[in-house]
Amino acid sequence: MQTYILRRLTLAVPTVFGVTVLIFVAMRLLPGDPLEHIYGENTGIYVLSEEELQKARASLGLDRPLVVQYASWIADIARGDMGTSFWTDQPISAMIIRRGPLTMQIAIVSVLVSWLVGLPVGIIAAAWRNSALDYVARFFITFFMAVPSFWLGMTFILITVIFFAYKPPITVYNLWDDPGKNLQIMAGPALALGVGLGAFIARMSRTQLLEVFREDYVRTARAKGLGEQVVMWRHVVRNALLPVITLSGLQFAFLLGGSVAVEQAFSVPGLGRALIGGIQDRDWTIIQNLVFLYAIVFVIINLIVDLAYGVIDPRIRYQ
Amino acid sequence: MSQNTEQVFGQIQPKRRTRTGQFLENARRFAQSSLLGTGAAVFLIFIVVIAVFAPYIVLLRPDPLYQDYGALLRTPSLEFPMGTDGLGRDTLSRVLAGTRLSLMVSVSAVVISKIIGFTWGIVSGYFGGRFDLFSQRALDVLISFPSVILALLLLVALGAGVNTVIIAIAATGIAGTTRIIRSVALLVRETEYVLAARMIGAAPLRIMLRHVAPQCVAPLLVVASASLGGAIFTEAALSYLGLGVPPPNPSWGNMLGGILVASFKPPWWLVVFPGFAITLTILAFNLFGDALRDHLDPRLRGRLE
């Protein structure tokens, strides 16, 4: 197990390095530099003279060679310093600490929702295979797999606004400060994301269950006279749900990306909206560091899923 | 007598199967095996027809860009079956015109990412060695971004526009395709016929083209049809965020952008119709993709049904 963990960790190092390089190159691919986009003659909002531009560049360190800029960015990140916003000069780490918990919370709650919705539906559909119930379940599974989460969110908003004349609060409320307001902000996005994920969970658990039903050990369990309930819960469900749990981990990819649009739909002041705001304002430090954060979180979650799978299923370790 | 034999032999002789004949035969078996998949395929053909003829269909309706200030935010009626938006533009025209853009962007993105992934996967899987190791690490990097985030990053770098949206969405699909094609190529590389080809001195390029690539086509089709729905979603999400297809050109995604911001009497028709267009298209692509996978890989059929 230790060698397995070690191997996975060593593999993550070049990946993170590559991620930083890709982000940095992408951010510098533009013609000119960020300042030109903000203050340039044709593209900018303000116009600065050449001299003022030089000065601003020097103060931001943009006049240094790219390699040096890259190295100093990495050094800053390593120290946990993500720099300050181009526009407001506020530290980005403070922004992440303020907004990050909400995005994280939405992600976690939507995974919970997806289990609460998806597992029962999948289990029921599999247990009563080819019944009317199964067909209804499959209809909803197929439908909700296709519904874009942000649009589902918009329909939630429509319904609450039209029928209840209700809109959730739009500033940050932390769970530990004001649980009620926090829940109001979170519920919509978490449901909109969770139902979509739940459809995938339901489909996966249904196929997995049906597959396990055919296994020899299930026949053995029945043959030795165990009750159908015991066979179902102790033998079938336990074995079938392993891949489903992995799927949940992998869904974070969808969740982290999808939550950007969902946060926008609900006007939730999370990290996704900060990123979109940063892009709209051409706030380069925000974009660069938030994209990095998203990627890093994604890498870490995948790592955890891999390691957890290695713990649960020892066969994986020796591949 | 001789005439008779000729007739008989004429009948016995196997019909030459032309390419079209083979395709039709395949299509017939596909239709027989999956009613749902066929329905989805018919619906998709319908959408493609709309996309192709959108400019002409739209002639029957107000221009999608025409702003009728006498008819702002109309609810659906006979005159405007899907209502009008805040600038007085006909939603039906815009949904029809959006079909063209949304489909064009998603299909081109998928085609580009599949071509790159196909080539990369075959080369990487067939040659193996240091190139493979390096390309695996590169793919690790690409796969480390949630797809919407990667697309956003590329859009920031390349600037907004229809072409850049296509490139950004294509980039999100490369890593997955390459992985799958590579895994197939790895298996094919070890087969006897590839060994035989190598024995008689076939060049690597020839082996890859004649022996490895054909085996990878079926998985490629499965991956491609499965990722079309995802591409539609990504395009819609990006355009919804105002970073995809730039206005005023309508795409299903950008029609949804910014309409629920202001009022307590939200225009529900502006949310419902483009959203249904997106959902139904993704649904059709998903159903068709599943049916195609079952058709091309019958081993999976029993398992996944």
Image (cartoon, rainbow, N blue to C red):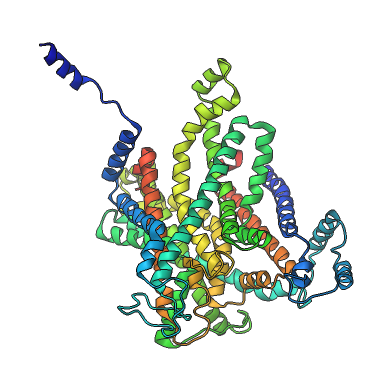
Q: Is residue A9 visible?
A: yes
Q: Is residue A108 visible?
A: no
Asked if residue A70 is positioned above or below residue B139 in the image, the reply reads below
Give the residue displayed 66% in from the left and 41% down from the top. B135
Left or right? Give the position of A105 relative to A2: left
Asked if residue B203 is positioned above or below residue A41 in the image, the reply reads above
Left or right? Give the position of B244 relative to A73: left
Front residue (pair B183, A264): A264
Left or right? Give the position of A28 relative to B179: right
Residue A219 in the image: state x and y as whole percent. 33, 43
On the image, which quarter does residue A85 sit in? bottom right
Left or right? Give the position of B45 relative to B87: left
Q: Residue furthest left?
A: B1
Asked if residue B294 is positioned above or below residue A253 in the image, the reply reads above
- Image quadrant where one finds the N terminus of chain A: top right
Give the residue displayed 31% in from the left and 53% down from the top. B42
Give the residue displayed 45% in from the left and 50% down from the top. B226
Residue B192 in the image: state x and y as whole percent. 50, 21
Give the residue displayed 36% in from the left and 75% down from the top. B82
